[in-house]
Amino acid sequence: MFLSPISTGSIAGIGGGAFNPFWMNPGNVVGQDASHLCSPADAELLSVSVHRDVVEPFRDLHAAAANEGFDVSILSGFRSFEKQLSIWNRKARGELAVLDSSARPLDITTLSPRELTVAILRWSALPGASRHHWGTDIDVFDATARPSGYEIELIPGEYENGGFFAPFSEWLDARIANGTSFGFFRPYDRDRNGVAPERWHLSYAPVSTPFAHMLSPDLLRQTIQSADMMLKDVVLTNLDEIITRFVTNTNPNVP
């Protein structure tokens, strides 16, 4: 049970300001404690829960996008450890598709346990290590460009090369490049031989950075050891390599 909150102090914000101090404990970091999240009213307005200090910056981003004809909507925000564990286990059992690097389904019966673990990690975070646990990371799309009845897949083809959300994605590129993205950046902006590029995934740096620093190998190992998790032995045996390749191997250009 996680009891001792750790103060991060004031976090430097956009334009040199300071965010109110916020508290987080190890349970917040690994998705087992939701005390860092926004109010139910804000969650209803956004359609998802996010970290309480992400609400206002997202509203700013939404307003800037609206001026250019985009309707920034969040498909996925906070994700609990149990939710991430369910995704992981269903993929390991073959109940959800496991994709190759080109986002095409793999035949997992041909893969060794280690190969399957790596394949899952290309597109799905390790339970306990998902940035979505923090409520700072969101998967976004342009609601104005979404065809009626279309179920978003969050695959590269939707955001690149003439995809539905390519214009919105290109607008985000420009905002991030010129420092006007209100603290949001893409942690998986390109392929670093870890997590596949995710142009839909934004992270709010002023709060996600302290969370990333708090996620230690010992905390992650402890969390996984106590979980009913498929491929657990493989993960624990290779945890240091997994952390280096799939957890900390992110975009270093943090605003």
Image (cartoon, helix red, strand yellow):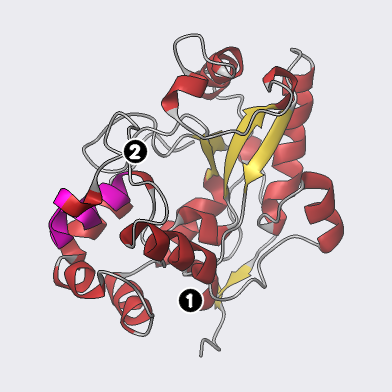
Q: Secondary structure at mark 2?
A: loop
Corner quadrant of residue 164: top right
Q: Which residue is mark 1?
A: 26
The amino acid type, in three-letter code, at marker 1 is Pro
User: Which residue is most to the top?
Assistant: 162
The stretch drawn in magenta includes residue 99: no
The stretch drawn in magenta includes residue 116: yes
Residue in view at x 52 percent, y 45 percent: 205
Assess disc 1: are there few (<14), some (14-19) or many (≥20) residues with their C-alpha within 10 Å of its C-alpha. Answer: many
Residue 89, above or below 203: below
* Residue 54 drawn at (x, y percent): 68, 49
Residue 194, above or below 153: below
User: Which residue is most to the right?
Assistant: 41
Assess disc 2: are there few (<14), some (14-19) or many (≥20) residues with their C-alpha within 10 Å of its C-alpha. Answer: few
- Closest to the observer, 41 or 58: 41
Residue 223, above or below 200: below
Q: Which residue is mark 2?
A: 252
C-alpha separation, residue under disc 2 versus residue under disc 1: 24 Å
* Residue 249 in the figure: left or right of residue 237: right
Residue interval drawn in magenta: 110-122
- Closest to the observer, 179 or 154: 154
Residue in view at x 57 percent, y 59 percent: 79
* Residue 99 drawn at (x, y percent): 32, 40
Could you tell me if residue 215 is visible in this image? yes
The amino acid type, in three-letter code, at marker 2 is Pro
